[in-house]
Amino acid sequence: MLLQHYKFLDPGQARRQALAQQVFCAALAFLLILSEVFSSNIQSTLPTFSHLARLALTGGAVLLLGAKILLLTDYERRWQPVLAGAVLLYTAFAAWYGDDVWFLLAALVGLGAKDIDLRGALRVYLAAAIAGLVVVQLLHFATPLMPYNFYCRNWDFGYGHYNGFGARLVGVFFAWAWLRHDRMRWFDWLGLAALFLFTYKVPGSRGAAGAMAGLLVLFAVQRFLPRLFDNKIWYALVIALPIGLAAFSLYAGYVYNPEWPYERMALLLLSIFLSGRFEIWHNVFWSADLSVLGGLPTDGDEHHAIDNAFLAIPMNKGYLGAILVAVFFLLLLWRLAKHRHATELLCLVAFTLYIFMENKPFLLSANPFLLMAPCVFFAGNKTPAEEPLPVVCQRTANI
């Protein structure tokens, strides 16, 4: 922590921690307002105002998170600030090269989350996300500021695409379920179930709704059989899940023949169930020229958008980025399993299912689990398995 080296600026440990929490939570609120409100259709009706607001919110969040990482984070090892610097340099380059600023913002959030009270941060996350959603819906249905932009099917709810609305809903769902897991009451179950039904029936975002349903089922089973998710076999299956889904995505897109799909009826039926995604994987991913650094667009119109993060990441971030992101995610799963944080693993199982169907792994409003990044960046391999990681829920062994 840089302030510790300047005694005349150091307000003391207690005040430093409080200031760090306030700075981090303010940055979270800025980014959620950016994603919830100013990444909506208001950009087409108030372009100048929206552009200035996006610049101010992005710049403000970057400055706040940079101050948190540089001035208000306590690094126990000399290599930790070096690692933080390397992560920021790479993600800044990849964000510029692939036109994906949320990749850099995700890294800033993950690095800034070190030593933060995650429960307090999640409360701010929920408040800002819900408020942003309500504002957008009010403006969309009551004013001409957020017109309906036709895409293909279903109403877009002010976000240009129904899955954009679903991404914001699933972020609220994940944050709510994660924050309240250890204290869930009947109204939490009812509220989460209602949010799932709304997402499935109203916008029809099946990727988001499927992830919600999966997490509700996992939480329900865990409530009665907690030990079912606290054993080496289950942990191995969790770590194997993203590997298996990545391999299946590559295989299905490669062998699927959109000109005559009937030669593989099982794949055709599964593709129909998944809204024709195999044809998209075939035409978009396998027609793309991949490279080490990537840079290919993975969002936009139907000729570039690909609803699968396992394929979108190597397209946009290249082979190098795909390897680094995979190592990060698998290391996070492994460390959570090692320290027996079964509930966080259940949350990441649901998130893995979501990004199998969608392409928003670095969007903060869809992924509150970015707050677990310090478990990878700053938890050493020599940390005893008995010591809990900086997460929200109790370990299964302690329940």
Image (cartoon, rainbow, N blue to C red):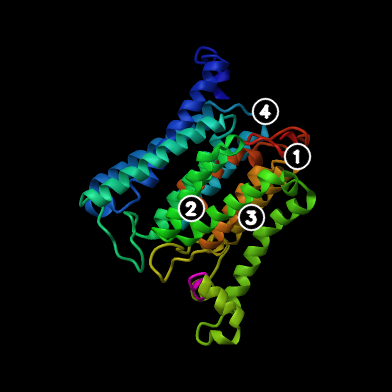
Looking at the rendered structure, the kind of residue marked 3 is: Ala
| Mark pair 3, 4: CA separation | 26 Å
Of the residues under marks 2 and 4, which one precedes in the sequence? 4
Residue at the limit of the structure toward the front, as seen here:
186
Residue located 28% across and 43% down the image: 52
The quarter in which the N terminus is drawn is top right
**What is the magenta range?**
274-280
On screen, residue 149 versus residue 301, left or right, reads left
Which residue was labeled with disc 4?
76
Which residue was labeled with disc 1?
381
Tell me residue 302's x, y (percent).
Answer: 40, 70
The circle drawn on residue 10 is: none
Of the residues under marks 3 and 2, which one precedes in the sequence? 2
Bin the neighbour count of mark 1 within 10 Å (Cα to Cα): few under 14, some 14-19, many 20 and up: few
- Whether residue 104 appears in this view of the structure is no
Residue 275 falls inside the magenta stretch: yes
Q: In what element is the residue under mark 4?
A: loop
Which residue was labeled with disc 2?
196
Depth order, front residue of 276/377: 276
Mark 3 vs mark 2, foreground winner is: 2
- Say whether marks 3 and 4 touch (CB < 8 Å): no
Residue 193 falls inside the magenta stretch: no
Which residue was labeled with disc 3?
326
Of the residues under marks 1 and 2, which one precedes in the sequence? 2
| Mark pair 3, 2: CA separation | 28 Å
- Whether residue 204 appears in this view of the structure is yes
Looking at the rendered structure, the kind of residue marked 1 is: Asn
Locate residue 17: give its quadrant. top right
Residue located 73% across and 45% down the image: 337
On screen, residue 324 versus residue 151, left or right, reads right
